[in-house]
Image (cartoon, helix red, strand yellow):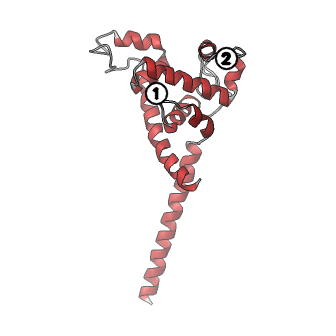
Amino acid sequence: MLKRNRSKILLSLIFFAILTCIVGIILVQIRFPIRHLDVIKANAGNFEPAFILAVIHAESSFRPYVVSHRGAMGLMQIMEPTGIWLAQLMGKTDFEADQLFVPETNIVLGTYFLNWLWRYYDGDITLILSGYNAGIGNVNRWLGDERFSKDGETLYYIPFWETRTYVQRVERNRQIYEWLLKIYGLFS
């Protein structure tokens, strides 16, 4: 009788542990959604999909119609002048600013910009994310300032709090998305 009760208790504990894991995974997926993965994979270029998902999460939490207090639009929070410039670089002649609210268009432009920054900053993720968030002009000024960069190539300190926390947030999100994509791959 005692062995039977121990077996029931053990099975109950295993069942509740599995249930807790499943509920935990579901809650994490609600907080960190995986959307537009096909478009992301097709346009990621030098980046893993987890990185692009992390940027989108940090920029807009996957809200396609969000507009920042500075006027950045869509999933990857692209400013209208930047969108026009990127569209021109890509040879798109029929670009209109309201297309920044179309997830596919926004992702194509945002990933193109990240890959442009990849080439510009020679793959340095901190510089790429800082440039994406604070602008290339700010990052280049920081690189020329010994308080922030001792060698003119590496940022040792990001003076904008928003950009500093943005870089950290994207890195944390990337790790979460790497884990989620592994799980996603198991069930898809």
State the image coordinates of residue 59 (x, y, percent, origin top left).
Answer: 55, 28
State the image coordinates of residue 160 (x, y, percent, origin top left).
Answer: 42, 18
- Residue at 69% across, 28% down: 102
Side of 181 where 96 appears, left or right: right
Q: Residue furthest bottom?
A: 1
Say if residue 46 shows up in the picture.
yes
The N terminus, quarter of image: bottom left
- Residue at 47% across, 47% down: 179
Q: Which residue is label 2 attached to?
A: 92
Q: Is residue 140 above or below residue 26?
A: above
Report the disc number at residue 68.
Answer: none
- Residue at 59% across, 53% down: 188
Residue 103 sits in quarter = top right
How packed mark 2 is, by other alpha carbons closer than 10 Å (few <14, some 14-19, many 20 or more), is few
Side of 187 where 153 appears, left or right: left
- Residue at 58% across, 27% down: 76
**Looking at the image, is mark 2 or mark 1 earlier in the sequence?**
2
The secondary element bearing badge 2 is classed as loop
Q: Amino acid at mark 1?
A: Tyr
State the image coordinates of residue 22 (x, y, percent, origin top left).
Answer: 54, 58
Q: Amino acid at mark 2?
A: Lys
Foreground tag (2 vs 1) = 2
Residue 143 sits in quarter = top left
Please name whichever residue, 92 or 132, is drawn nearer the observer in this view of the structure: 92
Q: Residue furthest left?
A: 150
Say if residue 162 shows up in the picture.
no
Please name whichever residue, 97 or 39, is drawn nearer the observer in this view of the structure: 39
Q: Is residue 62 above or below residue 144?
A: below
Q: Is residue 175 above or below residue 63?
A: below
The secondary element bearing badge 1 is classed as helix
Q: Which residue is label 1 attached to?
A: 166
Side of 1 where 64 appears, left or right: right
